[in-house]
Amino acid sequence: MAQKLVVIGAGMASGRMLEHLFEEAPGAYDVTLFNAEPRGNYNRIMLSPVLSGEKTYEEIVTHDAAWYDANHVTCRFGERVTGIDRAAKVVLGENGPVSYDKLVIATGSNPFIIPLPGHQLSGVVAYRDLEDTNAMIAAANAGGRAVVIGGGLLGLEAAAGLQMRGMDVTVVHIMGHLMERQLDPSAGYLLQKALEARGIKVMCKADSQEILGEDGRVKALLLKDGTELPCDILVMAVGIRPNTLLGKEAGLATGRGIHVDDAMVTSDADILSLGECVEHNGQIFGLVAPLYDQAKIAAKTLIGEAAIYVPREVSTKLKVTGCDLFSAGDFAEAEGREDIVFRDPGRGVYKRLVLEGDKLVGAVIYGDTTDGNWFFGLIKDGTDISEMRDTLIFGPNFQGGASSDPLAAVAALPPEAEICGCNGVCKGQIVAAIQAGATTLDAVKAETKASASCGTCANLVEQVMALTLGDVFERPTVQPMCKCTDHSHEDVRLLIKSKELKSMPAVMQELGWKTPDGCHSCRPALNYYLLADWPLEYKDDRQARFVNERNHANIQKDGTYSVVPRIWGGVTTAAELRAIADAADKYDVPMLKFTGGQRIDLLGVKKEDLPAMWADLNDAGLVSGHAYTKGLRTVKTCVGTEFCRFGTQDSTGLGIRLEKHLWGSWTPHKLKLAVTGCPRNCAEATCKDIGIVCVDSGYQIHVGGAAGMEVKETQLLTTVATEDEVMEIVSAFTQLYRENARYLHRIYKWLDKVGLEWTREQVVDDLENRRALAERFEISQSVYRTDPWAEHAKPSERAKWGPIADLTIAEAAE
Amino acid sequence: MSWIDIGALDDIPSQGARVVKTAQGCVAVFRTVDDQVFALDDRCPHKGGPLSEGIVHGHSVTCPLHNWVFDMSSGEAQGADDGMVRTYPAKIEGGRVLLDAAKLTAPRAA
Ligand SMILES: Cc1cc2nc3c(=O)[nH]c(=O)nc-3n(C[C@H](O)[C@H](O)[C@H](O)COP(=O)(O)OP(=O)(O)OC[C@H]3O[C@@H](n4cnc5c(N)ncnc54)[C@H](O)[C@@H]3O)c2cc1C
Ligand code: HEM
Ligand code: SF4
Ligand code: SF4
Ligand code: FES
């Protein structure tokens, strides 16, 4: 007589298991199939094409009434199982009990709902079943705006579907890039670009705070930074949790999922489990490929054949038409790996292979996934790839030939892209001039004025010439930024602007970086270029900063730090001095020293004490002196007309005014100023990056001094009559330096390249340009004129400055 | 091996590091851009620089004091520089970072 089999959950895993069972042992079991959803098995992963309108529900049904009939399955669809009585071997359905000889739990998983205020409002949906899909379709038919929380596979498929149905969609993702579990930042960048190109807005590093509603319906999503995103529907796709409830209540061994052994049997020998609800050797599942393997094993176990489930590598594809990505293998939890990276900026292709010894263990591909399955095969089979290591990344059909092309980025520029910023010359004009016979740089310069002013773009112009003229043009070699790229600093700066590259992955992809995430030499430079060019869009990347700028203090040779509060213009008060003295006492500061910049250095502070010390100093009104930055350091002053008998102007007042205006700004290298009250020059203004010398008739503005390994005297830029003019010209000059110079060039070095005369044209003679530069400086300062100490001294931030764990305590206890 | 949980992966910034104090000195635990973790002595063999404060790129870290570059999986200095930092087994499990306690507490050669 046939045994009784009860299956809880008619999902993708159990459907496949029943197919195997009926094929191999027809009639062995009388099957009762419960499903909470009011329908039988369908292909859940194809809900996305249903949502987007590319398929109908009928087309994705995998088992219809005729099939259940033919296999004598008693279907109890739309009926939830509420409990299992293991002693009596009975399953309790909402409409009555059923007894079993063998039981299979295949309850899948539940979508995780972040318990934000407002999450029960109507119009807030998850993305798991046909009901969710239909709710989204209904919302889309009504039109309007959608917000999707979660930039993973499901969230993006939901976003693409809603967008294809005509909604205005914004994806809110908490991590730094999309699909971070499958993709690295470079591939995530390309994906974001493709989604944005089809009209989907993407916000990364965006943290949700509250769902706002009106009359019980969702109205908007409020982010922690205060942004409000109005929406008519809100989809939450932030992850899944194995649905273990029945198993747990029945007393089966469960961890994150229901524990199963290699035969898919739970801690009760008569109960099997498979699918997303299980945990096997510590692993849980979220894709169908491993579930299909489990289905095979579970069927064998049910008919009494020995079988062993072996988890296999999984690969991921995104089912969004036009977004071609592939990710396979395991990127985490192992040491000793090596990367091979290939980028083709022109075609928007990114490939990264991860090797461990002589084996391929992971692959991330965006843009051209034709070789994806070949790589996946190498990963699954553990093929020894040492023979083909050098050409592996080009795929199975590699015919030999060039690898990355250093001219690709310039080749990919459209004709209207600006090459020469000074004279507004675009690529098309240069190509036209070359085609009309200008075959030397000088000829192109004469013809178009490109690179005729500051000269920074000369190398880019030469690249355009090489592309247009081919091999006949011999391009002088340039010094690349570092080993990660063939581009020079100047090219990178210009391309960041002309291609509107606004993130680190964008730069690395579009300019063909040869490493996954750069190195200690290019990352700080790129971080500076990006924040200088896109102050409002780009967020400073602390991890791309040298230790002093990351920790807002100078590291000393013994690993302690020095703290230098800002003393505006060198003028302090008794109260400030007392606060500094108190801090020195409280934190056992071994040395207090006057710096050469008219302020006080507290040396030898421990890293974990920094935030508390800053908070104390903040309380007395003291802020960071930025003694550690490539940015504004000090404005040294003398006492001027206030006290000195020779003083011609209020040099102290002007110095304080300048410092309050410029502080917090980032510059290519450090920026030191001084204002001295008469040409006796007590404040040593003529060896500063920018020095103001007060005279009877007004103010001389000097630039390009330095007193380091090289000592440079300043050159006179201009003389003006009023303080206001000083302020505007210094702003404009600083901004020109910020926008134009290469990272780690002091002003004098930059002037050696572009010439004092050119800067004078820009900020003295051309009034309109001066004003525009000063305005851009002010826009940037609207973001950066803040005290970094205050931010890091917040109680919520302090723990990050100490050790993550202290094992000395545990060890001592043993 | 006896694994010891030292904290959540999310407590370590991507392309950054945190420090674990042990009786024998500090161990730097790094998190790379592809979310792997590496544990090394927090002392550069050159002049003792704190490696945890270096810039992390690929699977390498650059010492903040004089720019020696170390491969974090082997602990070996790259390029022209010659030196070795001790490494410790580290892994991620369920979002937590685990170090091998046996190796951590074993006395080290100075
Ligand atoms: C929109 C979407 C797109 C996806 N795309 C992909 C993809 O491209 N590739 C991929 O590999 N994977 C994809 N997945 C994941 C894949 O669908 C799942 O891995 C798979 O469906 C899990 O199968 P399962 O049988 O474990 O669970 P499910 O298919 O979820 O089935 C479980 C069933 O059990 C029922 N149930 C739960 N509790 C009870 C109870 N107490 N009583 C009765 N019945 C109950 C549920 O109603 C459900 O029907 C996608 C998922 C979604 C939602
Ligand atoms: C790579 C080269 C340099 C290094 C490593 C260096 C290092 C330092 C250090 C460690 C301090 C102490 C700041 C503190 O303790 O917080 C300091 C401050 C100072 N340095 Fe240098 N320095 C360099 C180049 C220069 C140059 C070229 C000059 C002169 C133009 C200079 C002038 C000063 C002055 C005036 C101060 C005091 C600054 C203040 O009050 O903020 N330094 N420098
Ligand atoms: S620079 Fe001139 S005004 Fe200033 S203190 Fe010296 S002498 Fe006086
Ligand atoms: S002069 Fe040399 S030794 Fe003195 S603080 Fe500057 S870098 Fe250090
Ligand atoms: S101490 Fe590390 S490089 Fe000098």
Image (tube, grey):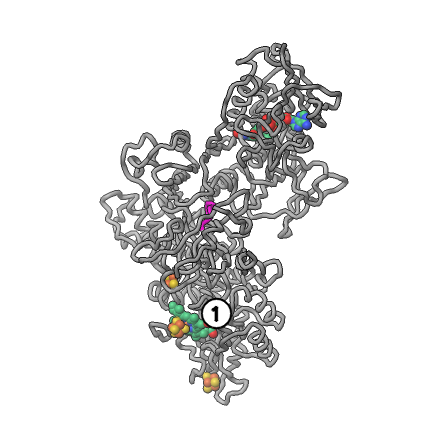
Picture quadrant of residue A103: top right
Query: Magenta residues?
Result: B33-38
- Residue tagged by mark 1? A627
Residue A785 can be seen, yes or no: no
**Ligand 2 closer than 8 Å to label 1 CB:** yes
Quadrant field for ligand 5: bottom left
Q: Residue A14 at x, y = what percent?
A: 59, 22
Q: Nearer the viewer, residue A76 or A464?
A: A76
User: Considering the image in quadrants, where does the C terminus of chain A appear?
Assistant: bottom right
Residue at 33% from the left image edge and 45% from the top image edge: A407
Q: Residue A282 at x, y = what percent?
A: 54, 37
Q: Nearer the viewer, residue A455 or A297?
A: A297
Residue at 66% from the left image edge and 44% from the top image edge: A221
Q: Nearer the viewer, residue A752 or A664?
A: A664
Compared to residue A325, the image places residue A229 above or below, namely below
- The amino acid pointed to by label 1 is Ala
Q: Secondary structure at mark 1?
A: loop
Q: Residue A764 at x, y = what percent?
A: 44, 68
